[in-house]
Image: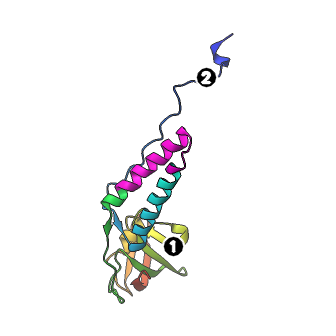
Amino acid sequence: MSRAFVKEDDQGGPQAPPERRPSGLPNWVTPRGLKLIEAKLEGLERALAAKPDEQQAAWLRRDLRYWTQQRASAQLAEPLGPQPQAVAFGARVTFRRGAGRPETIEIVGEDEADPAEGRISWASPLARALIGAEAGEVVELGERDPPLQIEVLAIGPIG
């Protein structure tokens, strides 16, 4: 019989999962982001204590290494005052893209970002275009041709 039709299950056990690598950018976090990292670590430690199978344990240990590194490198950002003058990390920003409807986002750390929930990473093109802008100012998202005009309507702290 040809070896082409033989299933080879024995390849030396389960393969190690690929490592999760940080982006290499500063690991700025909001107070909420730091709590999320702590909760992630606690959940992973509980999952490992439950004695999962070898393959699942390998994935859990991989994630534990990543989140331990993220906690160690976390740089907690000072909360913004009640009336920030310019868009910065930790800001809630209301803006309008072109002639569109107003949108509100929060600028947060990379691990805390969840665009569906209105939280974007400070390293995203939109956040980078907004950072430093003041209410009433129009900035361009230059990743497009022609660039997209974005008007900053309001700035506040994440609350």
Tell me where residue 70 appears, x and y as whole percent: 36, 58
Q: Secondary structure at mark 2?
A: loop
Tell me the residue at 44%/82% (across/down).
159
Name the kind of residue labelled 2 in the image.
Answer: Glu
Tell me where residue 122 appears, x and y as whole percent: 38, 68
Quadrant assignment, res 24: bottom left
**Quadrant of the snapshot with the N terminus:** top right
> Sequence-wise, which precedes: disc 2 or disc 1?
2
Asked whether 142 or 59 is in front, the reply is 59
Look at the image and give the residue range highlighted in magenta.
49-69
Checking the image for residue 118, the label placed there is: 1
7 to 132, vertically: above or below: above
* Residue 121 visible, this angle: no
Count of number-bearing discs: 2
Tell me the residue at 54%/43% (across/down).
56
Tell me the residue at 30%/61% (across/down).
26
**Residue 68 on the magenta span:** yes
**Residue annotated with mark 2:** 8
Side of 23 where 12 appears, left or right: right
Tell me where residue 143 appears, x and y as whole percent: 41, 63
